[in-house]
Image: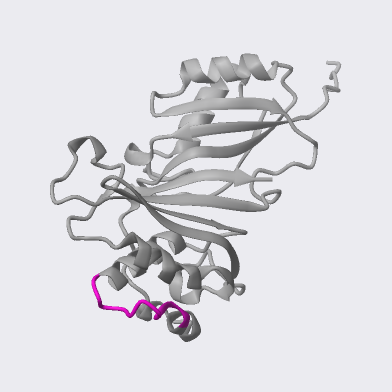
Amino acid sequence: MQHICDERVVRNLSLIICYDGKCFHGWQIQQNAYTVQEAFQTALEKIIGTDYDVKGCSRTDSGVHANRYCISVKTKHPIAPERLKAALNRWLPMSVAVLECSEADADFHARYSCKSKEYIYKIWNSEVRNPFLDGYALHYRYPIDETMLNKAAQSYVGTHDFTSFCTPDSREQDNMTRTVKHFSVTRDGDMVTMRVEADGFLYNMVRIMAGTLLRIQQGKIPPDGIPAILEKKDRQYAGPTAQACGLYLNRVNY
């Protein structure tokens, strides 16, 4: 039997998706848990078969959402980007949507080509809970002084060892240094939003940063206490890990 060599060129596609993380156990495929990557690859295989290699820009935890999440896909399939976008949006569950799909340079990698990421953390700051935000914002019934917290949060900005703001985990090895480019705490009515951009994030880093600011609000950590916590390089000195429901990967910069 004569074997025919597949001489089709390997293409690299960049896709931007958004997803509601409420019913997913994060992005990365796991055994015995439904993830965004599994949902995405199941849809992709209905369109192009198994000729692909998928890379996601970040590992997100169970219950965390994404407004703009980048995926790079290498494949020899000739489908046009706009057709792939339309087909994926037909087969993906309602909790996931493809916003953009385009050709990318051969060396583009959704994770390793990233220059910075921005996360937001949403807090519904009202005595009365909002049923429509269940799973989409942390409900915090006590007063929040967003001006005071915004000032305290500026101590996060800069290049620091963030060991105190990382849940110990095998995925984090030697380098615990990250550069935070921006951190703000703002209010729009009853919604308080924490926004942080950095060149990278450690495991649970944003949620611990948010939990620490809430401890400052409660008077359990002084408003100028963040530099001392950073200096300790010990998780026990920071605040608790805030719930996943309020966290969104907002954008990825390349």
Residue in the image at 29% along x and 63% along y: 145
Picture coordinates of residue 131 (x, y %)?
Answer: 18, 37
Residue 185, percent from left and from top: 41, 57
Corner quadrant of residue 252: top right
Regarding residue 123, the answer to whether it shows in the image is yes
Q: Is residue 91 magenta?
A: no
- Quadrant assignment for the C terminus: top right
Determine the residue located farthest toward the left in the rendered image: 128
Assess whether residue 219 is covered by the magenta stretch: yes
Residue 51 picture quarter: top right
Instruction: Work out whether 34 lies above or below 201.
Output: above
- What residue do we see at 23% from left, 41% from top? 134
Return the residue nearer the eye: 143 or 136: 143
Name the main secondary structure of what is drawn in magenta.
loop
Residue 114 placed where, x, y %? 67, 49
User: On the picture, is 195 further left or further right than 137?
Assistant: right
Residue 59 visible to the viewer = no
> Magenta stretch?
218-227
